[in-house]
Image: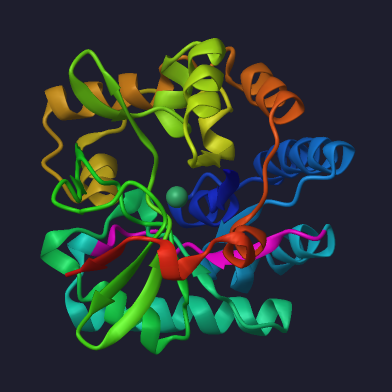
């Protein structure tokens, strides 16, 4: 089973970051339309995790995605890493996001992904917050170590039921593969850009479950240079040393040139479904249970 997801946030981030121009929004619109057209050609429905600010400030984008038959999920409100927030802040952010999205699409939002997969051991209370907002499916767990978090102690790499503090939630973790002795992701973001398409397809063909995840920004050439210390610290909430800023810049831009073509081929050559659909096909009584 291959699941296709997109995280939709660029318009709202551009607005908040002060680089939201008519031309910039038009570029995002154009790329979104290209994605929607290829998905239509293939008859594929994806899950699109949108931020609450997208629903508030760019409702036409969220409604367009919904009108083409894709599942609208929640990708936080402001796209601040959840592990940088207090529990109260995270609760407020989640409530604002889910409310804005539901008001925009006129429907209950059931699926969630935290920005940068920022739910881990230190903030697993997020699962309680999600359940209290009526979220039933989560795809925020990156079950290995990574910059800014990850959840290396998480006990399943397959769809599973999380039990925590009296609540239950279905989890769709990010897919991992073993590469040069390390557990790494391969089916989205910078990892997708780094690995040749044949490698990604090969790993997908061999595994029972692959969670693919993309941002439009993963596919666009970077126009801005290395972030200033202030920009970096405001965005990543990490020390903006020269080393950190260059490392992040290189990582964010690695392999961007061929990324669009690769994604197009991937969608044309592989079968995908969204979380809403896959949810109905999984035998949850036979799936792993992870108690946190
Ligand atoms: Zn995101």
Residue at 55%, 61% in the rendered image:
282
On whether residue 232 falls in the magenta region, the answer is no
Q: For this rendering, which residue is in front, 284 or 107? A: 284
On screen, residue 185 versus residue 54, left or right, reads: left
Q: Can you give x and y, in whole percent of width and height, for residue 84 in the image? A: 19, 61
On screen, residue 201 versus residue 137, left or right, reads: right
User: Which stretch appears magenta?
Assistant: 69-82
On screen, residue 32 versus residue 18, left or right, reads: right
Residue at 26%, 33% in the rendered image:
228
Q: Can you give x and y, in whole percent of width and height, for residue 35 in the image? A: 74, 38
On screen, residue 77 versus residue 263, left or right, reads: left
Location of the N terminus by quadrant is top right
The quarter holding residue 285 reads bottom left
Point out the residue furthest to the right here. Answer: 41
Q: How many marks?
A: 0
Residue at 48%, 14% in the rendered image:
199
Q: Can you give x and y, in whole percent of width and height, for residue 224 in the image? A: 45, 27
Q: For this rendering, which residue is in front, 191 or 177? A: 177
State whether residue 279 is above or below residue 212: below
Is residue 85 among what the camera can see?
Answer: yes
Residue at 72%, 36% in the rendered image:
31
State whether residue 257 is above or below residue 62: above
State whether residue 285 is above or below residue 24: below
Q: Can you give x and y, in whole percent of width and height, for residue 187 in the image? A: 47, 31
Q: For this rendering, which residue is in front, 162 or 109? A: 162
Prevalent SS, magenta region: loop
């Amino acid at each position: 089973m291959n699941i296709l997801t997109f995280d939709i946030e660029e318009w709202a981030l551009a607005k908040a970051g002060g680089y939201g121009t008519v031309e910039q929004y038009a570029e995002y619109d154009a790329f979104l339309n290209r994605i929607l057209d290829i998905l239509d050609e293939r008859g594929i429905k994806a899950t699109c995790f949108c931020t609450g600010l997208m629903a508030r400030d760019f409702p036409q984008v969220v409604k367009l995605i919904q009108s083409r038959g894709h599942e609208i999920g929640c990708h936080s409100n402001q796209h601040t890493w959840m592990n940088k927030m207090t529990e109260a802040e995270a609760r407020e952010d989640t409530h604002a996001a889910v409310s804005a999205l539901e008001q925009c699409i006129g429907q209950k939002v059931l699926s969630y992904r935290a920005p940068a997969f920022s739910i881990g051991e230190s903030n697993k209370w997020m699962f309680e917050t999600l359940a209290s907002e009526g979220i039933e499916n989560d795809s925020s767990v990156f079950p290995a170590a990574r910059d800014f978090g990850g959840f290396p102690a998480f006990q399943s790499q397959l769809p599973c039921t999380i039990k925590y503090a009296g609540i239950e939630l279905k989890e769709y973790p990010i897919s991992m593969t073993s590469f040069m002795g390390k557990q790494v992701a391969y089916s989205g973001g910078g990892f997708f850009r780094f690995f040749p398409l044949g490698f990604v397809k090969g790993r997908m063909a061999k595994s029972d479950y692959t969670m693919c995840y993309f941002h439009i920004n993963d596919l666009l050439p970077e126009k801005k240079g290395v972030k200033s210390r202030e920009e970096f610290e405001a965005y990543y909430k990490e020390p903006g040393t020269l080393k950190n800023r260059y490392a992040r810049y290189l990582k964010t831009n690695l392999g961007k040139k061929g990324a669009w073509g690769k994604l197009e081929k991937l969608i044309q050559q592989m079968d995908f479904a969204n979380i809403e659909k896959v949810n109905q096909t999984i035998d949850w009584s036979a799936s792993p249970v992870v108690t946190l």
